[in-house]
Image: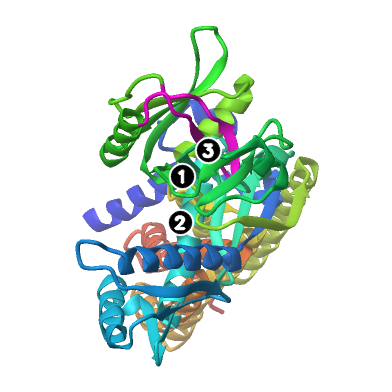
C-alpha cells in the first residue's frame, strides 16, 4: 500500500509543477522555485547571434608575446646575458641569431627552461627558431573559446538579459540566443569589444615633429585618443599594469557630478599600480582601452590603495557599459558577428497557438482510440497519458530547461511512445485472459512480461537522446532534453501509475475485462 501511495504522491507533485505553465494566473500562489517553463527563442521571440572567435589575431598576439619573452629570457642579467641579433617575429615564428657559436646550446637550454614543452625550439648553426607546438596551439584555441563564452555570459548577465543560451559550436563559434530581445544592437556592441585595458607611461621625450612624421622611436607606440582620433599620444610599449589585474569596476560620479568609472585592482595589481604612481610622480601615464587612449593624466601623488578613477567625458550609459566590459574581463580574441536572426514575438505566439491546437487534436484522437479499443482500461491509459504530459512540462520547468519548438516535437514523440508502452501490456493481458487465466492474474502477468520489451525500447531511445544532447547544439539539444525527460516519465506512468490505477479499478475482484472478446 505504501508503494502505491508513493507513486500517487510523485504523480500529483509533478502535476502541480506544471500548473504555473498550464495556468499562469495561478503562478503567484506557488513557491518561487515552482515557476512556468522557460520558452525558447522560436516560441518567445528574440534574437540569435552566431559569433566567430578570431583565433588568427589571437595567435599573432601570442607570438608577439613570445617575441618579448624570448628577448627578456636572453638578456636576463641574473642568469647572464646571451648576445644575439636579428630577433624577428614572422608568420608565427620567432627567430634570432646567437652571436657566439658556443652559446647556442646555452641559449636553447635557457629558452627550454622558460617555455617548457609549450614551444618547439629548433636551431641551424647560430640561428634559433621558436614557435608554439601544435598541441599548445590547440589548447590556446580551446581555452580562448571557453573564456570567450564565459566572458560573453558575464557581460550579457550584467545587462539583465533573462534566460540567455550561450554555447560553443563547431570549434571556434559561439551561438547566442536571447529570448525576448528584439533589438540586439546594444548587446552586439558590448560583446564584440575586446575591452583590453592597459596602463602605459607616456614618452615625454617625443617631439611634435616625430608625432607628425608618424615614426615612433624604438619601444614607443603612437596611439590615438578615443574621443579625438586625429590626436596621437606617444606611449611606451611596455605594459606597466594590465587590465587582467582588475578586480572590480563600477560607474560612479566625480566631485563635479560627472560620470566616471572607478577601478579596483587585486593585490598584485595594486602593488604594481602603487609602484607606478610612486616612482613616476609628475609624469603622465596613459589608460589604453583596445588600442585607444581613454585619458593620459599626470600622476600628482602616489596611489597606494589600488583604487583608480577613469574619466573621459562619459555619459552615464557609456560609463555603465565600460564598467561592465572591464568588470567582465578582456576577451582573449576578437569576436565577429557572422550571422544574426531576429524572431518576432508574434511569430512565437502563433507557433504556440498552433502547437496547442495540434497537441489537443492529437490527444483527443489518442483518447478516442484507447477508449474504443480498450474500454475502461483505455480511459485509465488516457489518464496516465495526461499525467505523463504534465510531468514532462513540470520537470522541464523544475530543471530550468528551455522549451523550444523541437522540444515540443520531443514531447509529441514521447506521448506516442507512451501509448505504445500501454498497448503492449494490454495486448498481453488479452492473450492471457483468452488462454483462461483469471483477470487479476492476467493483469499481473501482462505487465510483468511486457515490461522487458517496454524497458528495452525506451532505454535504447534514451541512449540516443543522451547522445543527441551531448553532441548536438541549439534545437537538437532542446529536442533531446524533452525526449529524455519524457522517456523517464513514460516508464514511471506506464510501469507504475497505470498498474496502480488498474489495481484500484479491479478492487481485488476478477471483473470482466471489457476489451477481451
* Circles 3 and 1: CB atoms closer than 8 Å: no
Judged from the image, the secondary structure of the residue bearing numbered disc 1 is: loop
Res. 205 mark:
3
Q: Magenta part of the protein: which range?
A: 280-299
The reply to whether the magenta stretch includes residue 317 is no
Asked where in the image residue 283 lies, by quadrant, the reply is top left
Q: Position of residue 352 (x, y in %)?
A: 72, 48
Q: Position of residue 104 (x, y in %)?
A: 31, 85
Compared to residue 502, the image places residue 44 above or below, namely above
* Circles 2 and 3: CB atoms closer than 8 Å: no
Residue 371 placement, left or right of 503: right
Residue 30 placement, left or right of 349: left
Label 3 environment density (alpha carbons within 10 Å; few <14, some 14–19, many ≥20): few
Q: Nearer the viewer, mark 3 or mark 1?
A: 3
Residue 309 seen anywhere in this rendered image of the structure: yes
Report how far apart the C-alphas of labels 1 and 2 lie in the structure.
10 Å
In the picture as drawn, the residue positioned furthest to the top comes out as 256
Query: Which residue has dot 1 on it?
Result: 329
Report how far apart the C-alphas of labels 3 and 1 lie in the structure.
33 Å
Query: Which residue has dot 2 on it?
Result: 147
* Circles 1 and 2: CB atoms closer than 8 Å: yes
Q: Looking at the image, which residue is at 47% across and 42% down? A: 198
Q: Which of 329 and 483 is in front in this view?
A: 329
The reply to whether the magenta stretch includes residue 282 is yes
Judged from the image, the secondary structure of the residue bearing numbered disc 2 is: helix
Q: Looking at the image, which residue is at 50% across and 56% down? A: 332
In the rendered image, the quadrant that contains the N terminus is bottom left
Between disc 3 and disc 1, whose residue precedes? 3
Amino acid at each position: 500500500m505504501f508503494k502505491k501511495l508513493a507513486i500517487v504522491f510523485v504523480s500529483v507533485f509533478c502535476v502541480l509543477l506544471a500548473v504555473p505553465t498550464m495556468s499562469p494566473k495561478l503562478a503567484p500562489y506557488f513557491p518561487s522555485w515552482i515557476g512556468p517553463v522557460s520558452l525558447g527563442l522560436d516560441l518567445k521571440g528574440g534574437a540569435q547571434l552566431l559569433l566567430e572567435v578570431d583565433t588568427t589575431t589571437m595567435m599573432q598576439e601570442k607570438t608577439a608575446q613570445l617575441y618579448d619573452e624570448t628577448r627578456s629570457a636572453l638578456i636576463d642579467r641574473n642568469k647572464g646575458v646571451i648576445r644575439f641579433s636579428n630577433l624577428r617575429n614572422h608568420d608565427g615564428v620567432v627567430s634570432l641569431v646567437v652571436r657566439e657559436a658556443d652559446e647556442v646550446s646555452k641559449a636553447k637550454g635557457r629558452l627550454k627552461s622558460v617555455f617548457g614543452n609549450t614551444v618547439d625550439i629548433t636551431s641551424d648553426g647560430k640561428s634559433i627558431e621558436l614557435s608554439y607546438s601544435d598541441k599548445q596551439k590547440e589548447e590556446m584555441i580551446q581555452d580562448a573559446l571557453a573564456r570567450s563564452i564565459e566572458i560573453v555570459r558575464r557581460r550579457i548577465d550584467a545587462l539583465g538579459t533573462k534566460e540567455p543560451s550561450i554555447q560553443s559550436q563547431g570549434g571556434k563559434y559561439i551561438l547566442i540566443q536571447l529570448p525576448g530581445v528584439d533589438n540586439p544592437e546594444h548587446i552586439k556592441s558590448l560583446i564584440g569589444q575586446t575591452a583590453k585595458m592597459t596602463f602605459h607611461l607616456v614618452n615625454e621625450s617625443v617631439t611634435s615633429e616625430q608625432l607628425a612624421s608618424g615614426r615612433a622611436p624604438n619601444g614607443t607606440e603612437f596611439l590615438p585618443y578615443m574621443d579625438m582620433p586625429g590626436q596621437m599620444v606617444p606611449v611606451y610599449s611596455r605594459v606597466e599594469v594590465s587590465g587582467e589585474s582588475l578586480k572590480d569596476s563600477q560607474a560612479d560620479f566625480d566631485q563635479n557630478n560627472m560620470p566616471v568609472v572607478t577601478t579596483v585592482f587585486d593585490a598584485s595589481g595594486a602593488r604594481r599600480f602603487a609602484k607606478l604612481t610612486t616612482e613616476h610622480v609628475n609624469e603622465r601615464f596613459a589608460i589604453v582601452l583596445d588600442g585607444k587612449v581613454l585619458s593620459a593624466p599626470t600622476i600628482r601623488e602616489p596611489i597606494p590603495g589600488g583604487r583608480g578613477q577613469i574619466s573621459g567625458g562619459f555619459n552615464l550609459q557609456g560609463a555603465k557599459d565600460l564598467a561592465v566590459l572591464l568588470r567582465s574581463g578582456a576577451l582573449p580574441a576578437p569576436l565577429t558577428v557572422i550571422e544574426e536572426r531576429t524572431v518576432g514575438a508574434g511569430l512565437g505566439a502563433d507557433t504556440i497557438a498552433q502547437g496547442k491546437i495540434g497537441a489537443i487534436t492529437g490527444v483527443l484522437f489518442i483518447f478516442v482510440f484507447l477508449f474504443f479499443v480498450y474500454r475502461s482500461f483505455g480511459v485509465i491509459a488516457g489518464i496516465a497519458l495526461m499525467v505523463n504530459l504534465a510531468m514532462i512540462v513540470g520537470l522541464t520547468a523544475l530543471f530550468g530547461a528551455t522549451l523550444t519548438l523541437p522540444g515540443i516535437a520531443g514531447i509529441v514523440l514521447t506521448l506516442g511512445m507512451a501509448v505504445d508502452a500501454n498497448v503492449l501490456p494490454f495486448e498481453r493481458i488479452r492473450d492471457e485472459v483468452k488462454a483462461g487465466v483469471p483477470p487479476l492474474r492476467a493483469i499481473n502477468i501482462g505487465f510483468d512480461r511486457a515490461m522487458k520489451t517496454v524497458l528495452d525500447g525506451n532505454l535504447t531511445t534514451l541512449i540516443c537522446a543522451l547522445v543527441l544532447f551531448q553532441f548536438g547544439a541549439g534545437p537538437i539539444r532542446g529536442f533531446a532534453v524533452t525526449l529524455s525527460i519524457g522517456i523517464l516519465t513514460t516508464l514511471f506512468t506506464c510501469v507504475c501509475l497505470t498498474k496502480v490505477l488498474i489495481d484500484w479499478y479491479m478492487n481485488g475482484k476478477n471483473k470482466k475485462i471489457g476489451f477481451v472478446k
